[in-house]
């Protein structure tokens, strides 16, 4: 029998045999190194070059950094960026913390709605949220202004989103659900006994929150603030749509402008981008340090222990009202204003007259748009392609990092997470420069956008895969090896099937974020390779607001469907939340 | 059959240093025998077993199975675990949750590319052997602990391994089931004549199952012997203490004969079996098991190889099928295990007899 043969013919163990394991490991490693590092190198290199024109070849120069740092505008730019990012981060954190506390620690009604909030930034892309808030809060056409003006019978401007405060409001509001999730996690990891002890000592609800809960949550809140800060300084849609028209510049919008001048100032954009990259790196580094320190002092106790919630008595109607107001400004108003405008032939404020002109013409116009079919196809192909590539590469990398003792695997982990520090626009710029010089035929095709998405979303794939990898007991793999399975057989028949729930959830998540991606696609698309978010951008530039709204409504519904699918898949395959 | 020679295995710790998990471990397991690695948690048993399996790469030594070198630091040989053909049962059982019972057990044969029909036949045979044939189609996640353990065993056996490696296979079961599975495991091993290396920290398990036992401590083997030798003639204080409970009586050797000696101690002179390395005038401890401390109300018969003395009962604990007596003899308190029929009240005096071959003098230097 086969065993008997094997038993008596010792295998030449030291003989050099070809092991597919090294190909399967080597290829993703090389790929990640390429994706994460090469564009970075090109970006930095480009920042030291003069603009290339037909007449003049590029030369080395420090002029870009001189302009970026020493011009008088620079102080303004820096101050604006900082003000915007800090403002938006603080606003998100304040809202998010309040909501998280209400949800985790009090008996506020309507609690089931809270977690629906978590998906808002996912299903309403930044550009649509911003456009919706322009329709609500612009000084001329904003519905809030119109309504208040009619109410008080004046023509004073009540709110104006085209200001720094307006920018902070829109961006901070949009990402407050992210703060909510971060702070919810924090509250859950705190030992409820600490708060109950304070209550037993006679402290009131407010005193417990102020003296115990918040101080304990403080380190985690600081970490959340850093995450939100990095996210806000990367934000492109709000500064571009609200800041640029009135001359409020931040780094992202300045990068965009530098590229879109003639001749385009790629070197200057790269110098801004390097600055932005340093800022985000610093923020993420500080956040990592903070959270690894926090872990030492954290008061995590037995899991699954929900604390008794505080009875707010009559006050709970106040908290419920606050929550409903919040729901109104973050979901209902933006969505409804888009729906309303999508039902018009040209944009107008709600009125009886306008109501009689309601039609579906704009939807028809979008569907008949010559670009529409191609654009949707591009988005779908890119979403599926990048989601599967990301999940597969990151599965192998997560396996190497979590399971093997390959020396230098921590470097691989960091390499795969490196794209986290790239703001979308900066990544787009880096990739653009890279493949402009490396002429391998991807520039101007869908491939370049594909490369950008894979790079940008690799860290998300890593997160999903390492989390589920850590849950797979290593003996499950070892017993396959003891059963005689080779590495590739073990990976295919044991590791991948066990990763399936995480893979699926990650796949859908990456699909969603690819579909709504704007900031890196915007520097990479060319005629014929537009994606849906780019089409929205172009409709905005052309002033076709009703068509934009129709497309936006359809996009939101499609994304919502995907999220629901993800949750169903999650339940079916036994994962808690995406 | 299996021979492990001067095995060293290390782990890298966080600081960049090395944890010497296994140091200079050597032993032989003859064909068809069950060999046990016994020791407290963290002593390196699992590491030794995983080194044999090929799941850890040792730093030095040699491992040979059935005349085939699977590891040799000198000759630069390291056979990958999937080419060793050793069956292994992990402590966690490692049942694949995405496969059913049959698929779990069939996996080793599938990777060997056997024909479907042969696979079916052999899997059903092995499932029958572990009494799981009725559950072949059940989801692996819906098995009880005992069933998982048997499935893990079936999966290891189905490939007809040269060598069976078991890492604490009973430790995840509750006490009743543990006893039953222990005897089943023993029967299966004896019936199939499987060469087996068994890892446990439970001395009862080791004593009941093994042909031979190696007691390990801090990465080293301290004694190898049959269960009886390990229990009755522990070579050092650690073994005596770890394998069963025992009395230690400190003293000095006053006379040394052929394998036996006389020890003067705080409870008087004790005639004892001299273990290796015991010299005249050496400081020793005498180890005597509680069940070998015989108590009687009347003066017992004493041959010249017995130690007999008189003591006082300090305390006694009723434990159901036996009694623990704490008897004070001289300055020493002895623990004695006695039949419940002995009803002498606390405070009374009582006679103590210890046979010389049950008292082991162990060098304490
Ligand atoms: N993967 C590992 N990395 C570092 N040290 C380890 C690892 N596995 C085991 N050790 C250390 O090696 C020693 C022996 O462990 P082990 O063989 O698991 O002991 P046992 O199975 O006898 O309880 C212990 O000190 C343990 O902490
Ligand atoms: Mg162990």
Image (cartoon, rainbow, N blue to C red):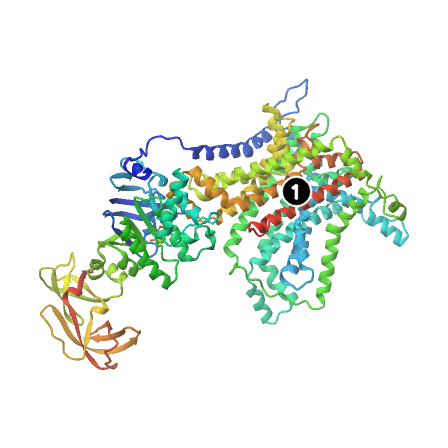
The x, y position of residue B65, in whole percent, is 27, 42
Residue plotted at (82% across, 46% down): A142
Looking at the figure, which quarter contains the N terminus of chain A?
top left
* SS label for mark 1: helix
Q: Nearer the viewer, residue A47 or B182?
A: B182
Residue at the spot of label 1:
A233
Lateral position of residue A110 relative to residue A358, left or right: left
The x, y position of residue A440, in whole percent, is 58, 24
Q: Nearer the viewer, residue B166 or A525?
A: B166
Labels in figure, total: 1
Q: Is residue B171 visible?
A: yes
Q: Please tell me how crowded label 1 is: few (under 14), some (14-19), or many (20+) other residues with Cα within 10 Å.
A: many
Lateral position of residue A64 relative to residue B20, left or right: right
Lateral position of residue A403 relative to residue A324, left or right: left
Q: Is residue A65 visible?
A: no
Q: Nearer the viewer, residue A14 or B347?
A: A14
Q: Is residue B237 above or below residue A8?
A: below
């Amino acid at each position: 029998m086969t065993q008997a043969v094997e038993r008596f013919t010792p295998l030449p163990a030291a003989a050099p045999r070809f092991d597919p394991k090294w190909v399967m490991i080597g290829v993703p490693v090389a790929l990640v190194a390429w994706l994460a590092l090469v564009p970075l190198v090109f970006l930095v290199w480009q920042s030291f070059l003069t603009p290339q024109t037909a007449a003049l070849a590029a030369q080395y120069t420090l002029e870009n950094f001189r302009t970026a740092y020493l011009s008088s505008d620079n102080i303004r730019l820096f101050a604006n960026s900082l003000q915007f990012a800090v403002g938006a981060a603080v606003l998100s954190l304040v809202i998010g913390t309040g909501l998280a506390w209400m949800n985790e620690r009090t008996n506020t009604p309507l609690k089931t709605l809270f977690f629906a909030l978590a998906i808002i930034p996912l299903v309403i892309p930044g550009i649509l949220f911003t456009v919706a808030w322009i329709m609500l809060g612009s000084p001329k056409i904003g519905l809030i202004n119109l309504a208040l003006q009619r109410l008080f019978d004046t023509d004073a401007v009540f709110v104006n989103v085209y200001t720094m405060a307006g920018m902070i409001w829109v961006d901070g509001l949009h990402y407050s659900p992210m703060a909510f999730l971060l702070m919810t996690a924090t509250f859950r990891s705190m030992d409820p006994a600490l708060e109950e002890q304070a209550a037993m000592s006679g402290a009131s609800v407010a005193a417990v929150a102020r003296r115990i809960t918040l101080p304990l949550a403080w380190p985690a809140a600081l970490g959340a603030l850093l995450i939100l800060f990095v996210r806000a300084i990367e934000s492109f849609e709000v500064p571009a749509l609200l800041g640029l028209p009135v001359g409020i510049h931040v780094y992202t919008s300045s990068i965009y402008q530098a590229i879109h001048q003639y001749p385009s100032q790629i070197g200057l954009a790269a110098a801004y981008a390097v600055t932005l990259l340093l800022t985000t790196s610093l923020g993420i580094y500080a956040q990592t340090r903070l959270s690894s320190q926090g872990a030492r002092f954290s008061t995590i106790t037995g899991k699954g222990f929900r604390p008794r919630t505080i009875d707010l008595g009559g006050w709970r109607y106040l908290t419920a009202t606050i929550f409903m107001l919040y729901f109104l400004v973050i979901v209902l108003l933006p969505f409804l204003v888009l729906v309303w405008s999508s039902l018009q032939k040209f944009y107008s404020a709600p009125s009886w007259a306008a109501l009689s002109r309601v039609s579906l013409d704009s939807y028809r116009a979008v569907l008949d748009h010559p670009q529409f079919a191609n654009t949707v196809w591009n988005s779908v192909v890119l979403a599926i392609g990048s989601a599967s590539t990301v999940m597969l590469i990151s599965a192998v990398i997560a396996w190497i990092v979590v399971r093997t003792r390959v020396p230098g695997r921590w470097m691989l982990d960091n390499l795969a997470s490196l794209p986290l520090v790239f703001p979308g626009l900066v990544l787009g710029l880096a990739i653009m420069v890279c493949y402009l010089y490396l002429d391998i035929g991807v520039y101007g095709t869908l491939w370049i956008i594909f490369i950008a998405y894979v790079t940008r979303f690799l860290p998300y794939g890593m997160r999903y895969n390492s989390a589920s990898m850590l849950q797979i007991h290593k003996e499950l793999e070892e017993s396959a090896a003891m059963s005689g399975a080779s590495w590739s057989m073990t990976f295919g028949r044991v590791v991948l099937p066990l990763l399936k729930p995480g893979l699926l959830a990650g796949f859908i998540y990456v699909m969603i974020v690819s579909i709504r991606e704007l900031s890196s696609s915007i520097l990479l698309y060319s005629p014929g390779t537009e994606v849906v978010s780019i089409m929205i951008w172009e409709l905005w530039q052309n002033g076709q607001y009703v068509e934009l709204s129709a497309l936006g409504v359809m996009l939101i519904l499609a994304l919502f469907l995907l999220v629901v699918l993800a949750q169903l898949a999650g339940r079916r395959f036994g994962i808690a939340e995406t | 059959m299996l021979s492990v020679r001067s095995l060293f295995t290390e782990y890298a710790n966080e600081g960049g240093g090395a944890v010497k998990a296994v140091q200079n471990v050597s032993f032989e397991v003859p064909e068809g025998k069950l060999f046990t690695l016994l020791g407290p948690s963290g002593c390196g048993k699992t590491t030794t077993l995983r080194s044999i399996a090929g799941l850890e790469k040792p730093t030095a030594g040699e491992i040979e199975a059935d005349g085939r070198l699977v590891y040799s630091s000198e000759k630069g040989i390291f056979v990958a675990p999937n080419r060793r053909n050793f069956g292994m049962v992990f402590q966690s059982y490692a049942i694949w949750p995405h496969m059913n019972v049959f698929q779990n057990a069939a996996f080793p044969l599938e990777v060997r590319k056997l024909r479907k029909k042969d696979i079916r036949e052999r899997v059903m045979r092995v499932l029958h052997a572990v009494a799981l044939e009725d559950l072949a189609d059940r989801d692996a996640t819906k098995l009880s602990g005992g069933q998982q353990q048997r499935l893990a065993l079936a999966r290891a056996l189905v490939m007809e391994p040269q060598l069976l490696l078991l890492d604490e296979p009973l430790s995840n079961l509750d006490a009743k089931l543990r006893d039953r599975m222990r005897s089943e495991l023993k029967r299966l091993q004896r019936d199939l004549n499987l060469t087996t290396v068994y890892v446990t920290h439970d001395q009862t398990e080791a004593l009941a199952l093994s042909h031979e036992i190696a007691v390990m401590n801090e990465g080293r083997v301290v004694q190898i012997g049959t269960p009886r030798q390990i229990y009755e003639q522990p070579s050092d204080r650690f073994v005596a203490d770890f394998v069963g409970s025992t009395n230690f009586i400190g003293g000095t050797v006053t006379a040394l004969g052929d394998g036996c000696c006389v020890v003067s101690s705080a409870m008087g002179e004790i005639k004892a079996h001299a273990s290796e390395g015991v010299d005249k005038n050496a400081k020793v401890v005498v180890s005597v098991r509680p069940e070998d401390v015989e108590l009687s109300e009347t003066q017992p018969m004493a041959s010249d190889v017995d130690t007999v003395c008189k003591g006082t009962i300090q305390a006694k604990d009723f434990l159901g099928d036996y009694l623990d007596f704490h008897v004070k003899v001289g300055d020493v308190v002895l623990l004695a295990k006695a039949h419940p029929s002995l009803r002498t009240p606390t405070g009374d005096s009582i006679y103590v007899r210890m046979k010389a071959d049950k008292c082991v003098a162990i060098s304490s230097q």
